[in-house]
Image (cartoon, rainbow, N blue to C red):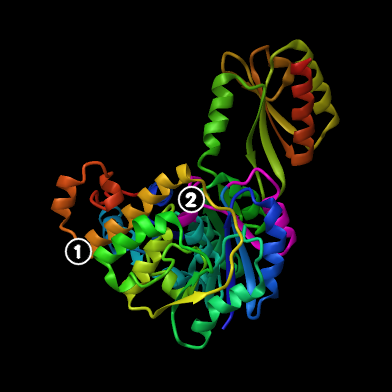
């Protein structure tokens, strides 16, 4: 895999580490704007090709190399730059465009630009706190590409279990997996006990409806 | 030459419609950019509806004026960038045209706007004395902290944006150090909100730190002296703690 990673800050560092782990033999190109960081990145990731580029030359680099790239990951410290670079990558048919947000408030703005993947590093805080503190429902992943969503519902009472079972029976396009309180995974709702969780996946609107139903039952 | 107009803003729903519309009326303006600081009101929605490109500043710090200005420069695509405060009640297209004119006519690469009023307190009591000490060539500017500026976009990629209130004087010094030709243009009367005195302490600190940091960088102050005697100043504000690791 040939991946272009842009940036030299925290996000880029962790992205580079992940890419190396996923594909140790792949071609990783890192672009940075300061010579000091280029040097540091070269030492930290010796098998990567680390390039110094001026901020306004990166778009030309993407255009010139778009046919060779499998993915562009914009992970600079400015959401403006990330948006610009992902936009050019998308316009030049790079198969995968990823932007790592600096400010989660930009999520909707990036979504409108049809960037394939928008990573909000702060999202994990919400997801994990919801799990740890026992929120009844939690959106785990929302796909921008095909409008599907994965969510978890904690089975807090019999009423919720009953409502969820009958709702799932009605929606063929929603699939579910159940995790019991003791950690067994099953595809059958009948094997779920109170305190376990249901993981549901389907079209976003339907998942949102099921989550609302679950909230209503829990609040009652 | 085309112009991008950039408005750093936060919770200014009341002003944004007029500001964006006025900017689009100015000659050569091809894009208007609103950089939002995390507004809780309708600023973003109105700006988008009026045809501005909108993004939320990358780092939600306060004051984040410098971050917002940097993000504006990074999002812009025209030849000339014009920055304006969004809360100027009497803003007209001429504000923008006057700021951009010296660049279009080839007289300058960077323009500082100034106004028909006495300069502010931080300007007179902090910025001007420090500029006179370290950058006497820049002491002639009437309003070195003015946020109404214009410059060639490509040069904004070569300067350092302070994060907060020090950004305006920082840009002035950095453009000067780049060798850019700088002029000051009187753009008339500016009707906008003034900050109360108590709100100026942090602003004055950041302006002073921005100037001192550059004075150290440009070897006008011995960094060892600064480290030893300026113990009340955060070392990072003076650029004395070099960034290590992936920051």
> Pointer 1: residues within 10 angstroms few (<14), some, or many (20+)?
some
| Residue at the image point whose x is 25% and y is 41% from the top | B232
Percent of width and height locating residue B180: 37, 78
Nearer the observer, A196 or A30? A30
**Quadrant in which the C terminus of chain A appears:** top right
Q: Nearer the viewer, mark 1 or mark 2?
A: 1
Q: Residue furthest right?
A: A170
Q: Residue furthest bottom?
A: B105
Percent of width and height locating residue A121: 50, 42
Instruction: Tell me the residue that label 1 is attached to.
Output: B220
| Residue at the image point whose x is 27% and y is 53% from the top | B239
Query: Residue B56: within the magenta?
Result: yes
Nearer the observer, B105 or A8? B105
Spatial CA distance of label 1 from label 2 is 28 Å
Nearer the observer, B207 or B218? B207
Instruction: Tell me the residue that label 2 is attached to.
Output: B64
Q: Which residues are magenta?
A: B38-67
Chain of residue at mark 2: B
């Amino acid at each position: 895999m040939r991946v272009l990673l842009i940036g030299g800050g925290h996000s880029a560092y962790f992205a580079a580490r992940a890419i190396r782990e996923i594909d140790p033999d792949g071609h990783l190109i890192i672009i940075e704007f300061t010579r000091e960081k280029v040097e540091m990145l070269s030492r930290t990731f010796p098998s990567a090709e680390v390039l110094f580029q001026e901020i306004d030359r990166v778009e030309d680099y993407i255009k010139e190399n778009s046919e060779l790239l499998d993915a562009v990951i914009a992970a600079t410290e400015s959401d403006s730059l990330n948006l610009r670079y992902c936009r050019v990558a998308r316009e030049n048919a790079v198969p995968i465009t990823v932007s790592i947000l600096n400010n989660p408030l930009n999520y909707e703005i990036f979504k409108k630009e049809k960037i394939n993947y928008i990573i909000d590093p702060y999202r994990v805080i919400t997801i994990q706190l919801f799990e740890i503190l026992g929120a009844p429902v939690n959106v785990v992943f929302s796909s921008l590409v095909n409008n599907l969503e994965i969510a978890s519902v904690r089975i807090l009472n019999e009423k919720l279990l009953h409502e969820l079972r009958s709702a799932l029976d009605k929606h063929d396009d929603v699939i579910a997996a159940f995790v019991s309180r003791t950690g067994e995974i099953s595809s059958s709702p009948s094997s779920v006990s109170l305190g376990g969780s249901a993981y549901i996946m389907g079209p976003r609107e339907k998942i949102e409806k099921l989550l609302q139903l679950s909230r209503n039952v829990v609040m009652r | 030459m085309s112009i991008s107009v950039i408005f750093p803003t936060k919770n200014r729903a009341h002003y944004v419609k007029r500001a964006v519309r006025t900017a689009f009326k100015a000659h050569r303006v091809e894009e208007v950019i609103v950089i939002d600081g995390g507004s809780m009101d309708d600023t973003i929605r109105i700006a988008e509806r009026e045809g501005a490109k909108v993004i939320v500043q990358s780092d939600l710090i306060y004051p984040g004026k410098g971050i917002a200005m940097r993000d504006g420069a990074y999002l812009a695509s025209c030849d000339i960038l014009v920055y304006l405060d969004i809360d100027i009640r009497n803003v007209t297209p001429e504000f923008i045209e006057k700021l951009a004119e010296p660049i279009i006519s080839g007289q300058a690469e960077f323009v500082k706007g100034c106004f028909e009023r006495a300069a502010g307190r931080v300007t007179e009591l902090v910025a001007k004395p420090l500029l006179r000490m370290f950058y006497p060539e820049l002491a002639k500017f009437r309003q070195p902290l003015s946020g109404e500026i214009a410059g060639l976009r490509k040069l904004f990629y070569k300067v350092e944006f302070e994060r907060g209130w020090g950004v305006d004087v920082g840009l002035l010094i950095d453009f000067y150090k780049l060798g850019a030709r700088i002029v000051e243009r009187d753009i008339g009367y500016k009707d906008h909100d003034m900050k109360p005195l108590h709100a100026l302490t942090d602003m004055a600190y950041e302006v002073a730190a921005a100037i001192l940091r550059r004075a150290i960088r440009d070897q006008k102050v011995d960094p060892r002296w600064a480290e030893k005697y300026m113990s009340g100043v955060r070392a990072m504000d003076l650029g004395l703690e070099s960034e290590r690791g992936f920051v």
